[in-house]
Image (cartoon, coloured by chain):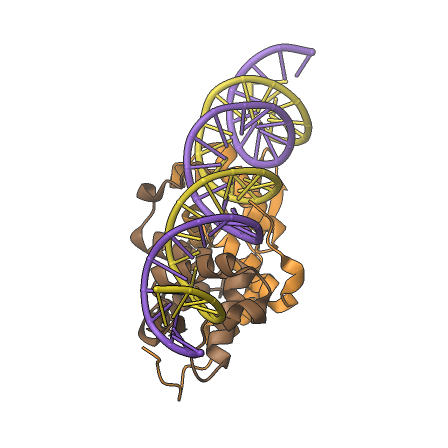
Chain colours: A orange, B brown, C purple, D yellow
Amino acid sequence: MGLAKTEMFTDQQNEISLFAKVFGHPARVSILQHLFKIDSCVCGDLVNEIGLAQPTISQHLKELKHLGLIKGNVEGTSVCYCIHKENWTAMKTVMTEFLNQDLTQKQDCC
Amino acid sequence: MGLAKTEMFTDQQNEISLFAKVFGHPARVSILQHLFKIDSCVCGDLVNEIGLAQPTISQHLKELKHLGLIKGNVEGTSVCYCIHKENWTAMKTVMTEFLNQDLTQKQDCC
DNA sequence: TTTATTAATTGCAATATTACGATTAATATT
DNA sequence: AATATTAATCGTAATATTGCAATTAATAAA
């Protein structure tokens, strides 16, 4: 892809972009929404729920876990996933700050 | 890349992922932050500010504009960019709703 | 122990992204 | 008109991502 030159950006900018990147695919958005919706934690029925192949779902789960937004617990042959609440909250703080940048008292150029 | 199967997701999920995707690169995060910081609108000094080549910056601006988050105004030989406030606010509503999904009264599996 | 179930890993094909040099387009300036 | 400045576009190389089939790993159940 031609790597992103992360060294020329701030830690904050890199962090924001990493979080955003993981939200940058509808399958991962869908997985997260499902994990929020379901009271008990979910495992492989995400495959049925979403309709992508098992290895594909597994990959997406891996990325979400790698970023710390979900955690997985082995239960027999299945793995139970759930939102990592503390990390989700921390992420939310970072992203919200970015989204809420000041919009006031500046006039458009256009 | 193997295209994302957008047809199997909701419009909302696709919209969230499109917004997130554009924030998924630190250069674009940086460009947006700069546009917010600078009172008057900015043009090509983003190149100096950020340190990527002019065609690269131009590409990133194009993506931001395509999604409607910024607008550009031609002023002589230069182009003046600024945040598209209405669209930014609308985007913020969508993203905030996603980030603020209910975290309460569910216990972890792990 | 054998078989079934579940999920991760590997390997691959298709496509997307990032970055930049070279060029082009368009307006300003001289 | 000639030149300078600014930014978009084109082409291309390098790398990343998505998705799946095939396989492997690991535990449960028989």
Q: Nearer the viewer, residue B78 or B101?
A: B78
Vertical relation: C14 (above or below) B33: above
The percent position of residue A38, horizontal first and vertical second, equals 43, 52
The answer to which of C9 and A109 lies nearer the viewer is A109
Residue B55 appears in the picture as rendered: yes
Relative depth, front residue between D30 and A90: A90
- Furthest residue in direction bottom, as rendered: A105
Q: Position of residue A65 (x, y in %)?
A: 59, 49
Residue B20 position, x and y percent, is 45, 58
At 45% from the left and 55% from the top, the residue drawn is B21
Residue C7 sits above or below residue A61 on the image: above
- Whether residue B100 is visible here, answered yes or no, is no
Residue A89 horizontal side relative to residue B86, left or right? right
Q: Is residue B15 above or below residue A103?
A: above
Q: At x 43% / y 63%, what residue is drawn?
A: B61
Lateral position of residue C2 relative to residue B92, left or right:
right
The answer to which image quadrant residue C26 occupies is bottom left
Residue found at x 35% / y 81%: A108
Number of marks in the image? 0
